Amino acid sequence: METITRKPYETDLTDDEWAILEPVLQRALYGDKTKTRGHPRHYPLREITNAILYVLKTGCQWRQLPHDLPLRKTVYYHFRRWQKRGVLAQIRDTRVEQARAQAGKEAPKYLAVDSQSVPSTAKGGHAGMTGARR
């Protein structure tokens, strides 16, 4: 288990949360393989994940990452890579399935979105904002 040598933040994953998330993340990134090729990782996967969660939970800019977390360029690179590969969606879906299983519920088969709950204006575009044409 990797130890964190810095002061923990409120947004950091607990050991129990990481034990659930690590296999999901490993499977999403590498499938059945293990990372044995390529450049060795400079920062642990858990630290990168903690840094991404810090940005997502606090809403700070990437440039405002604390200095004791991994470099912002590294964190942003991994975030975009995971986003493009669908890793973040896989993590979300897996966590939803696990939470529903713990609650004794089955996974939902259908999802309905009520479009009436989204406020809109009666007129579209700039009709009320344009001046008279000459």
Image: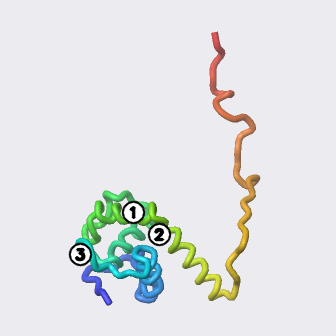
The Cα–Cα distance between marks 3 and 2, rounded to whole angstroms, is: 21 Å
Query: The N terminus is located in which quarter?
Result: bottom left
* Residue at x 41%, y 88% (from the top left corner): 15
* Residue at x 33%, y 65% (from the top left corner): 75
Q: What secondary structure is found at the residue carrying circle 1?
A: helix
Q: What secondary structure is found at the residue carrying circle 3?
A: loop
Identify the image quadrant of residue 60.
bottom left
Query: Which residue was labeled with disc 2?
Result: 87
Name the spot of residue 127 as percent of width and height, x first.
Answer: 68, 27
Q: Which residue lies furthest to the top in this view?
A: 134
Query: Which residue was labeled with disc 3?
Result: 40
The mark nearer the N terminus, 3 or 1, is 3
The circle on residue 91 is none
Q: What secondary structure is found at the residue carrying circle 2?
A: helix
**Residue type at mark 2?**
Val
Identify the image quadrant of residue 130.
top right
Q: Do the residues labelled 1 and 2 touch (CB within 8 Å)?
A: yes
* Residue at x 65%, y 33% (from the top left corner): 125
Query: Which residue was labeled with disc 1?
Result: 81
For label 3, the crowd category at 10 Å Cα-Cα, with few meaning under 14, some 14 to 19 and many 20 or more, is few
**Residue type at mark 1?**
Arg
In this rendering, position of residue 34 left or right of residue 123: left
**Residue type at mark 3?**
Pro
